Amino acid sequence: MLNNSVNKLISSLIDKNKTQQEIDLAVSEFYDAVNASDQESVNQVLPLLAKTFSIDDPVRAGIGGKVCGSLIEAGYDHHTKN
């Protein structure tokens, strides 16, 4: 579930045809998946999510950055092994 939701979020941010509403839905579904996942699983998807920082659209890259940053602030860290 988490891998599917992170892939959907990344695809939504990359796809310039996706609306803000579609992106918001992907973000919401991703957070739902995070809440249903263990810490190690979330830690493992952080590097995937970090790839959104290089998206050409700064607004969309910023969304990826905010999502990733919120996870780090919540205590997730891809360097941590549980």
Image: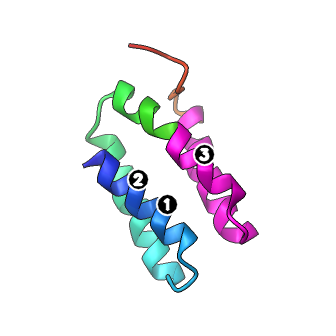
Label 2: state its secondary structure: helix
**Disc 1 and disc 3: Cα gap in Å?**
10 Å
Mark positioned earlier in the residue sequence (3 or 2): 2
**Of residues 82 and 16, the one drawn nearer to the viewer in this rendering:** 16
In terms of image quadrants, where is residue 8? bottom left
Residue 28 part of the magenta segment: no
Q: Position of residue 41 (x, y in %)?
A: 35, 32
Residue 10 circle label: 1
Residue type at mark 1? Ile
Task: Name the amino acid type tagged 2.
Answer: Val
As drawn, 79 above or below 3: above
**Label 3 Cα neighbours within 10 Å, binned few <14 / some 14-19 / many ≥20:** some
Q: Determine whether label 1 and label 3 are within 8 Å by CB.
A: no
> What x and y, as percent, mark residue 53?
68, 53
| Labelled disc at residue 82 | none
- Helix, strand or loop at mark 1: helix
State yes or no: residue 62 in magenta.
yes
Quote the CA–CA distance across marks 3 and 2. Answer: 11 Å
Write the residue at 43% across / 32% down.
Answer: 44
The magenta span reads: 47-72
Q: Which residue is mark 3?
A: 50
The rendered magenta stretch, by its main secondary structure, is classed as: helix
Residue 52 at x, y percent in the picture: 61, 56
Instruction: Name the residue beneath numbered marker 2.
Output: 6
Image point (55%, 20%), residue name? 79
Determine whether the residue tagged by mark 3 lies in a helix, strand or loop: helix
Residue at 46% in and 80% down = 21
- Local packing at callout 2 (Cα closer than 10 Å; few below 14, some 14-19, many 20+) is many
Using a 10 Å C-alpha cutoff, classify the residue at mark 1 as few (fewer than 14 neighbours), some (14 to 19) or many (20 or more).
Answer: many
Q: Earlier in the sequence, mark 1 or mark 3?
A: 1
| Residue type, mark 3 in image | Ala
Quadrant showing the C terminus? top left
